[in-house]
Amino acid sequence: NVVIAKCHHCDLACDVFINCVNAECNALFICCENCAVKMDNACSEACRSHQRDPNEKDYMSMIQRRYASGKSQSVNQNI
């Protein structure tokens, strides 16, 4: 498999898509595991610091569990 995509934050070769944690943004972007953790699954600092709905905390836990199990991609991992 040849990875032709790169992480939105650090430019590391990566092919995992995630949705921005900010429900108002909900951008679909490519993100490596390290940046997903560092950025709390946000596409930008603005979205990372955005006031979240209390129910989104449970959503974040679900996303982190999926990422750990390799099931976080919203679409096919192979581009």
Image (spheres, helix red, strand yellow):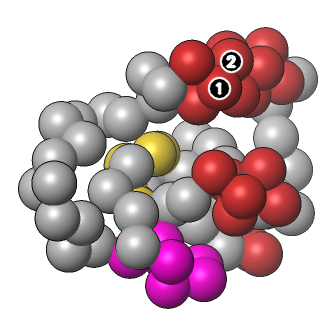
Q: Which residue is mark 2?
A: 65
Q: On screen, 26 above or below 52?
A: below
User: Can residue 16 be spotted in the picture?
Assistant: yes
Residue 11 highlighted magenta (yes or no):
yes
Image coordinates of residue 71 in percent, x first then y, are 44, 22
Task: Kindly check if marks 1 and 2 are in contact, taking CB atoms under 8 A apart as contact.
Answer: yes
Which of the 4 image quarters holds residue 59?
A: top right
Q: Residue at x 80, y 30 (%)?
A: 53
Region rendered in magenta: 6-12
Task: State how far apart marks 1 and 2 are (Cα).
Answer: 5 Å
Q: Secondary structure at mark 1?
A: helix
Q: Residue at x 82, y 60 (%)?
A: 38
Crowdedness near tag 2: few (<14), some (14–19) or many (≥20) residues, C-alpha within 10 Å: few
Q: Secondary structure at mark 2?
A: helix
Crowdedness near tag 1: few (<14), some (14–19) or many (≥20) residues, C-alpha within 10 Å: few
Decide if residue 44 is on the left or right side of residue 66.
Answer: right
Q: On screen, 41 above or below 38?
A: above
Camera-side residue: 68 or 30?
A: 68
Decide if residue 25 is on the left or right side of residue 73.
Answer: right
Q: Which residue is mark 1?
A: 68
Query: Mark 2 belongs to which amino acid?
Result: Arg
Q: Residue at x 18, y 36 (%)?
A: 76
Image coordinates of residue 9 in percent, x first then y, are 59, 79
Q: On screen, 75 above or below 39?
A: above
Query: Mark 1 belongs to which amino acid?
Result: Ala
Which of the 4 image quarters holds residue 44?
A: bottom right
